[in-house]
Amino acid sequence: MVDNPPHILLLEPYYGGSHKAFLTGLQQYVDCRFTLLTLPARKWKMRMQLAAPWFAEQVVELVAKGSRFDAVLTSTFLDVAVLRSLLGCRGIDLPLAVYFHENQFSYPGQVTDPGIFQFSSINFTSALCADSLAFNSSYNLESFLVGIGGYLKKATDMDLRYLEGRIREKSVVLYPGLDFSLIDAVPDQEKNTVPIIVWNHRWEHDKDPETFFQALFDLYRDHDFRLVILGEQFRYQPDIFSRARKILSDRLLHFGFAENESEYVRLLRRGDIVVSTAMHEFFGMAVLEGVRAGCRPLVPDRLSYRELFAEKYRYPAGGFKKHLKRLLINPVPLSAADAGQMTEPYSWPLLAKQYRDWLLTGKSFPRDTE
């Protein structure tokens, strides 16, 4: 513990899911003093458009009451350009960093949107106005820069290409830490006689549940397996989930959001294979949690998964059913040693120093060391 830890103001307009988990771990493991301001995890488009004025007023009030901060850390759901402008008008100038859990240039929309650049442009101007940027994977960073390059080409009568390089210069890759303590506290389960497949992703179109469940429909008749279907659900969800619940009812061990973390971990520990069919993935927390629990990963050979898993755990485009079938016929268990080796580099105890260095001495937050 440092004698006088810096005071970091955390602003999170979408406090849920991976964003919440990240900030919980950050506060627990990184040796800084934190103040956290949040909004609930809903209406992300509205958050990107209007959260900045709301947070600016909260910061102004805190400063007026005597709070002093060394820096601000926020996510991409906040319009940093607006926030800095509003704070600057009130005489508040703080070093500001943005953590990119995702970027809107690479997010696959469901429909053709005439305002497609509205939210990616907020990411872009936020990156320009922040002092430092951290991305949760190299894939996230590189896809963001590619998106910026294409975006800037549209300004045919203005040469803004240099801005891509300016953003790269102040960017680093910092994998989000995971807290595996609850998983490690649950003992290994007895070996299953029938393979258990785990799906533990959000019930949304970008995770491509259609490909996952269609493969199971095709394999259902000739192959025995059981299913643990987890993940966050929303008011509107792909119809394939209700179909799957009917068609695969006799194979389901669990279907729906876990009641609590202990139940979630218990169900992960039952699995043999954890899968992803995601059309976008900027990191892959869910699969890593499954691997830590002893599940063999089966993930697409694209996106951020190339950084996390060796080739033998990845399947090529269009190859999910074929590779899942192979594992059902000839199961290849994942040893506890392999599970630990694959996941430990992403644990908070190993990553905390990198975050501390970033917050205290990195190019993001120039601090008076005298």
Image (spheres, helix red, strand yellow):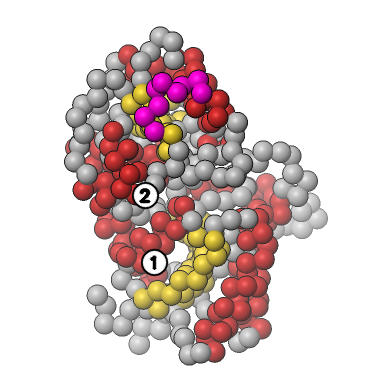
**Label 1 neighbour load within 10 Å: few <14, some 14-19, many 20+:** some
Residue under pointer 2 = 260
Q: Quadrant of the N terminus?
A: bottom left
Instruction: Work out whether residue 245 or residue 39 is closer to the camera in this orientation and state it.
Output: 245
Residue 366 visible at all: no
Q: Is residue 65 magenta?
A: no
Q: Residue at x 24, y 24 (%)?
A: 192
Q: Does residue 101 appear left or right of residue 114 in this picture?
A: left
Instruction: Work out whether residue 219 or residue 363 is closer to the camera in this orientation and state it.
Output: 219
Q: Does residue 200 appear left or right of residue 193 in this picture?
A: right
Q: Is residue 167 above or below residue 5?
A: above
Q: Is residue 48 above or below residue 67?
A: above
Q: Amino acid at mark 2?
A: Asn
Ranked by sequence position, the earlier of labels 2 and 1 is 2
Q: Amino acid at mark 1?
A: Trp
Range of magenta residues: 246-254
Give x and y (percent) for residue 225: 36, 20
Q: Quadrant of the C terminus?
A: bottom left
Tag 2 near tag 1, CB within 8 Å: no
Residue 187 visible at all: yes
Q: Secondary structure at mark 1?
A: helix
**Label 2 neighbour load within 10 Å: few <14, some 14-19, many 20+:** few
Q: Secondary structure at mark 2?
A: loop
Q: Residue at x 66, y 83 (%)?
A: 89
Q: Is residue 99 above or below residue 360?
A: above
Q: CA distance from mark 2 to mark 1?
A: 33 Å
Instruction: Work out whether residue 82 or residue 244 is closer to the camera in this orientation and state it.
Output: 244
Report which quarter residue 288 is drawn in. Answer: top left
Give x and y (percent) for residue 326: 36, 16
Give x and y (percent) for residue 15: 50, 60
Q: Nearer the viewer, mark 2 or mark 1?
A: 2
**Dot label at residue 358:** 1
